[in-house]
Image (spheres, rainbow, N blue to C red):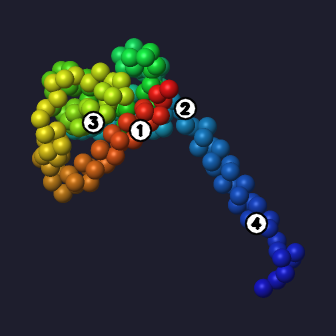
Amino acid sequence: MSAPDELDLTELRREWQRRRDALQEILTRIDARGMTRPARDADERAWLEQRGEIRLVEDEAMADSAMEYYARRYRHPDGDVPPPDLPGADLVFAGIDDLERGAETVPALLVSIGAPRLRRIGYAVPPNTPADPEQRLYLLLAREDADTAHGRYNALVRRLVSFERAAEGLRP
């Protein structure tokens, strides 16, 4: 092994620069409003809508109007407006809308699971939450695909908890 003052770091510096350039190129493509993926094709969108997992805002043209809609619709009692790009916000907002319509969807059942905490945070969760939302959600996921129901259930609950923690962090 050679002495430290004999090391040639030019290759390492080139690699670091290449990685910095690649990161910078990625950062220029990321929309600050949280829209980091291209628009879905029609088949993927229909499949996700059927499962109740479609993101509410998918293209940049809709993002500004959607943010205004969320700001009007999901206002905290103290006047603060949470940004719609909180983790899991798409599911929570869709779930609140579905509960208001009386639909039993994946987002609606997820919001029902977190209803007490969401109400404490300040969200107007409708009172018509179904009984045993945890079991109903699991059964709904198992009907779609029994092999992955457990993992998807846990992932959805983690997204709900992430949203709740982030929303609590916004409170004064």
Mark 4 vs mark 3: which is more N-terminal?
Answer: 4
Q: Which residue is mark 1?
A: 165
For marks 4 and 2, give the one nearer the viewer.
2
Q: Which residue is mark 4?
A: 11
Mark 1 vs mark 2: which is more N-terminal?
Answer: 2
Q: Which mark is residue 62?
A: none
User: Up-down: is 13 above or below 136?
Assistant: below
For marks 3 and 2, give the one nearer the viewer.
3
Label 1 is placed on what type of residue? Arg
Label 3 is placed on what type of residue? Gly
Circle 3 residues within 10 Å: few <14, some 14–19, many ≥20:
some
Q: Which mark is residue 114?
A: 3
- Residue 167 location (% of width, % of height): 42, 32
Q: Which mark is residue 32?
A: 2
Q: Secondary structure at mark 3?
A: loop
For marks 4 and 3, give the one nearer the viewer.
3
| Residue at 71% over, 58% down | 16
Q: Marks 4 and 2, Cα distance to the nearest angstrom?
A: 33 Å
Circle 2 residues within 10 Å: few <14, some 14–19, many ≥20:
few
Label 2 is placed on what type of residue? Ala
Q: Secondary structure at mark 2?
A: loop
